[in-house]
Image (cartoon, grey):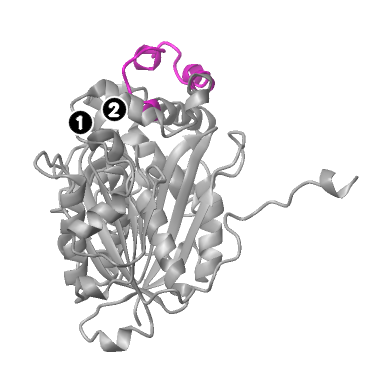
Amino acid sequence: MSRSEEPRPQRSGGGARPSLKGVHIIGVGQIRFMKHRAETVRSMAEKATALALLDAGLDRHDIEAVYFANSLWGLHEGQHCLRGQVAMRAAGIDRVPVVNVESACAGGAVALHLACVAVAAGLHDVVLAVGSEKMGWEDREKLRAVFATGTDARQLEERLKEFRTLFPLVDPRRRGSTEPGRETSVFLEMYAALARWHMHTYGTTREHLAAVAAKNHLHGALNPRAQYQQAMTVEEILADQEVAYPLTRAMCSPLGDGAAAVVVCSSTTLPRLGSARPVRVLASVHGQGSERDLTGEDLCQRLGRTAYRQAGVGPDDIDVAELHDATAYGELRQTETLGFCPEGEGGPFAVSGATTLGGSIPVNPSGGMECRGHPVAATGLAQVHEIVTQLRHEAGRRQVENARVGLAVNLGGILGWEEATGCVHVLAREA
């Protein structure tokens, strides 16, 4: 076999990167996620930035670089180029490098990853990551077209046909909301198909999915920044409008607007910030999905393994997690791939109460994307906002007792049988 024919080695989900020792989060800010009809991407970014700077005890002139995440501003208001430069000028930040980040639903986490790497590499001492997005559009056709851009647009119909082959796996009589032509999100069709595969393979039930959603609605009712703040029972969630079997509306993230921001700094900067409440960054891992089959190792599993190794921790060390629950199935599956429970047991694990506040590993105490909301590019930073709040022991009624190590997973798009891009961050409370 020639060298060119040798099989390529499997990568673990990220190449060599600078050590993150000495990288800290010192400020977080998030506006409530909801339909902000009077707000713009620019005005929401300005507010989230101001909140993060206030939390860090810094002035806008202290910021040395900005990573700005947004996916849809161009389609919504025509601001295709210079998004971060336009938004940051409005926030009073100029004369610094501003890098625009677009990575579908993972944009906010990718912006944070780049900020962490910039600080770790010694390029800057104080860096801002911002994500701002408007999703509350009235034009449903445009929304459907927008969601289609979160995959390979040229192969969209082919991919949908592949996903639809999974529809008959569970009760072929229940096809109503999954037949081609139904007006539903491309991503919901895909998540519904994967949920059916999991039900067929492991015996997962709709009641299991509803238990995940009910737990998130319980948590969301405790979060003043959540879009939905109303608890729902398993029975109410199962009775809600079906959007793509087995998923009901209450099992899926809503459309809404919002922004979040995070300030990252070096350890050499901390001594001059007397009022800072720093949280250490133990791991920041970014990766791309692969062309795998349904039984292969998925993106979250690969990134999670790399993050654990980089942080020097394992699943049993995680006290609190924010997972990418675009649907209840997403969270259920990630509790398995991250090692919180065995493969195929995510449903019983949720029903057991392990992921509820007071359980062994509380997941999505913010309410998750299902209740906190999911204004795409802001989501990853909102997850980190929650983890930082938990590790500072400032989460009030939703506080996880003695939380010291937290994990956040933010994924984006779909290519093939998994998400196209994603990040995992592991954070720790200062000793």
Residue 30 visible to the viewer: no
Which x, y percent locates residue 201?
Answer: 54, 31
Tag count = 2
Residue type at tag 1: Trp
Tell me whether the residue at label 1 lies in contact with that at label 2, contact meaning CB atoms closer than 8 angstroms.
yes
Query: Disc 1 versus disc 2: distance between alpha carbons?
Result: 7 Å
- How would you rate the neighbour count of disc 2 (Cα within 10 Å): few for under 14, some for 14-19, many for 20 or more? some
The residue wearing badge 2 is: 143
Kind of element beneath mark 2:
helix
Which x, y percent locates residue 314?
Answer: 51, 65
Kind of element beneath mark 1:
loop
**Magenta segment includes 184:** yes
**To which quarter of the image does residue 232 belong?**
top left
The residue wearing badge 1 is: 137
Q: In this view, does 71 lie above or below 21?
A: above
| Residue situated in front as seen by the camera: 117 or 316 | 117
* Residue projecting furthest to the right: 1
Region in magenta: 160-188
Which x, y percent locates residue 128?
Answer: 31, 65
Which x, y percent locates residue 164?
Answer: 48, 19
